[in-house]
Amino acid sequence: MQPVKPDYVNLGLSTPMGPQLRALVEQYLLTDLAAYVVLNQKLKFDWSGSCIEGRDSTYLDGSLENYSGILLFDEQDNLVADGWMEFIHEDDFFLVYWDYVTVWQDGKEIFDKPDPGIPDHVWAQLPDYSKLICEKASRRYIR
């Protein structure tokens, strides 16, 4: 993969997320990424290429969509991951995870989640009513 220069200022199409919502979304994405690979470093988000992919919701201090084009960089501005997020927001339950994600190390792909859907480690966190809603919407993915 060609080197990518990060842009930590431009928020792309993710601008409707307020600071609280953005911090929560980023924490969820970092936690979810740790289910796939071990990351012992501080990562920074680049939302500049974020694109709207369909669904939206309002939560905390803003609104969000299932954005694609999310990049994560390490402290030396090396690309660590890129992907597309998905979220579940039902009543009082909110959770964000990677729908697609590719992880990079030294410019080489070391992990890829190429199929959309809810992986087992996320499914286990859902309340029963959310599982029923997701099953009806065919949003289940078996890893």
Image (cartoon, rainbow, N blue to C red):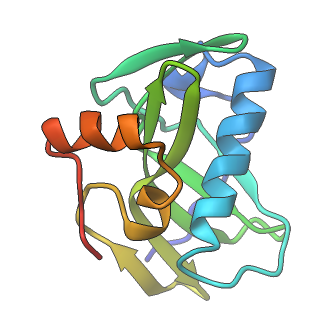
Percent x, y for residue 16? 59, 12
Percent x, y for residue 94? 57, 32
Q: Residue at x 58, y 62 (%)?
A: 32
Q: Residue at x 59, y 82 (%)?
A: 37
Reply above or below: 74 against 21: below
Q: Residue at x 40, y 33 (%)?
A: 66
Percent x, y for residue 14? 55, 24
Say which quadrant the N terminus sits in: bottom left
Closest to the observer, 74 or 134:
134
The quarter holding residue 142 reads bottom left
The quarter holding residue 132 reads top left
- Asked if residue 86 lies left or right of residue 80, the reply is left
Judge whether residue 129 can be spotted in this image: yes
Say which quadrant the C terminus sits in: bottom left
Percent x, y for residue 67? 43, 35
Check the image and name the residue furthest to the front: 128
- Asked if residue 135 lies left or right of residue 83, the reply is left
Judge whether residue 5 can be spotted in this image: no
Q: Residue at x 39, y 68 (%)?
A: 120
Reply above or below: 35 against 26: below
Reply above or below: 16 against 49: above
Reply above or below: 55 against 36: above
The quarter holding residue 60 reads top right
